[in-house]
Image: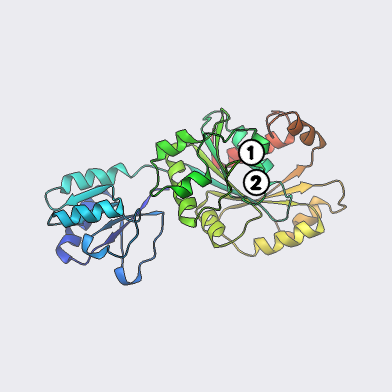
Amino acid sequence: MKPEFGLLCDDAQLSRLVLQVAADAGVELAILDSKNLTLNPDLIIMAQPELTADLKPGSVQALITSNLTEQVWQEANRLVAKQVIELPAASNWLESWLRSHQTNLSLLVTIRSVTSSGGASILSCALAQADTAQQNSVLIDLDFWRSNLLLLTGLEQTKAVSWHQLELMNSAPSASALYEGLPSQGIFKLLTQSRTSFTIPSNDTILTAINLLREKSSLVIVDQGTLRNELTNQISRKADLEILVSPCTLLGVDALKRELAETRGKQLVILRQVSRSDLKVRDAVDFLNLNNFVSLQSDEKLIRDIADGVLPGERKHSQLAKVSRSILDLLGVQ
């Protein structure tokens, strides 16, 4: 997935210059309306400084102008804009800058449990653990109220970047600084809550962090827990794969049926068999009319492994590890 660009400009001549340069760079620009502007962290905005008075710092990446003045520099400083571009003098530089952003972002997978204790965190950890070839996956924890990833991974958060630190920052860090600042298990990194400071980050902070980490990693896995709102739906729509985890029980299948009524893209259902349920996977699959699903048998050894410090999916011959590997195969990860 390539980044999207937007142009906020009411100067016809300046707009024509930018559009021509963008065409030469092979970049498609969305024309933005200053009177009806919806900020989207996924959008790289180039703006005319006369139209940015009501915009907040960090929302504009580049200011474009035909007359570089002290006021333009002051506005760039207020917005924390990364670039100030004077046209037509800097047309070649603008083309190079646009081309430099045409890098592919890494794969994005979202995992959500349709019921409490559905197993999203365990599968998220196992999936990151399975990516042994690249060894630069990132786990992002959005299960704020019942975060299990720190417990499952055993990672220390004492001096590492957390949601609390990101929310306190005035502007977003660079992709490299964010990636390198995360605690690492060796094969993967983790963005989660601080052990000492609980913070629910803003939607902008969450979306910006996901985009930045997709620039530096081979795979970003978002553990949504049971959280379902407009934000998680937005993230899932952009994902290369949305995984829904459900116990194979009457309650789980009922919740899953409601979830599947809302199509958000490429989905995979994980039906987790549990010993206390008499509902058979085949019956659940027929009832839900599923085509893309995986059956996962609950493993009593998994609880003992976690207590012993063994990561979910670390035992290569376990069913959980095999399911995780099959998901990577589905995504085309070698």
The kind of residue tagged 1 is Leu
Residue 242 to residue 288: above or below: above
| Labels 1 and 2 touching (C-beta < 8 A) | yes
Secondary element type, mark 1:
helix
Residue 228, horizontal then vertical, whole percent = 61, 59
Residue reaching furthest to the front: 196
Work out whether residue 324 can be spotted.
no
Q: Residues within 10 Å of mark 1 (few under 14, many from 20)?
A: some
Q: Which residue is mark 1?
A: 150
User: Whole-percent x and y of residue 302?
Assistant: 77, 35
Residue 320: percent from the left, percent from the top?
Answer: 71, 37
- Residue 4 showing in the rendered view: yes
Q: Marks 1 and 2, how far apart in space?
A: 7 Å
Query: Does residue 262 appear left or right of residue 182 in this picture?
Result: right
Q: Is residue 236 left or right of residue 22?
A: right
x, y percentage for residue 301? 80, 33
Q: Considering the numbered disc 2 on the image, is that residue within a helix, a strand or a loop? A: loop
In the rendered image, the quadrant that contains the C terminus is top right
Query: What's the mark number on residue 199?
Result: none
Left or right: where does residue 225 sit relative to residue 254? left
Along the viewing direction, whichever of 173 and 2 lies nearer the viewer: 173
Given residues 176 and 277, the one toward you in this image is 176
Give me the residue at 52% from left, 54% from top: 235
The residue shown at (17%, 57%) is 71
Mark sitting on residue 147: 2
